[in-house]
């Protein structure tokens, strides 16, 4: 949900494909950094699972359609 909010908030001034992807890259990177903390490890694991599902189900096929990849 945070990635979608960040995407919608910055959609107007970042007009490239990186404007669409940066929230969905930043969140897993931050969750990966949280994996080093024993206290936040369970939360970070959940965030990484949800991020992976987002990439596989939502972003991957759409990037393929936008980039012209044909299966």
Image (spheres, helix red, strand yellow):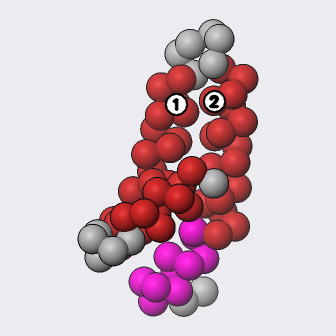
Tell me the SS state at disc 1.
helix
Would you place residue 15 above or below residue 33 in this image?
Answer: below
Across and down, in percent, residue 56 comes to 66, 63
Residue closest to the eye, 63 or 14: 14
C-beta proximity under 8 Å, tags 1 and 2: yes
User: In the visual, does 23 lie left or right of 15?
Assistant: right
- Which badge, 1 or 2, is on the more N-terminal residue? 1
The verdict on residue 34 being magenta is no
50 or 1, nearer to the observer: 1
Mark 2, Cα crowd under 10 Å, few <14 / some 14-19 / many 20+, is: many
Which quadrant, please, contains the C terminus?
Answer: bottom right
Q: Residue at x 70, y 55 (%)?
A: 53
Q: Indicate the quadrant where residue 15 lies.
A: bottom left
Q: Residues within 10 Å of mark 1 (few under 14, many from 20)?
A: some
Q: Is residue 66 left or right of residue 2?
A: left
The residue pinned by badge 1 equals: 32
Q: What's the magenta bit mostly, secondary-structure-wise?
A: helix
Counting from the top left corner in percent of width and height, residue 62 is at 56, 79
Query: What residue is disc 2 on?
Result: 44
Instruction: Decide if residue 39 is on the left or right side of residue 37.
Output: right
């Amino acid at each position: 949900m945070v990635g979608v909010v960040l995407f919608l908030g910055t959609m107007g001034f970042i007009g490239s494909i990186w404007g669409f992807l940066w929230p969905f890259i930043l969140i897993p990177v931050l969750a990966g950094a949280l994996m080093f903390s024993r206290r936040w490890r369970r939360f970070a694991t959940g965030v990484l699972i949800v991020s992976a599902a987002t990439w596989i189900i939502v972003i991957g096929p759409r990037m393929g359609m936008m980039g012209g990849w044909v299966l």
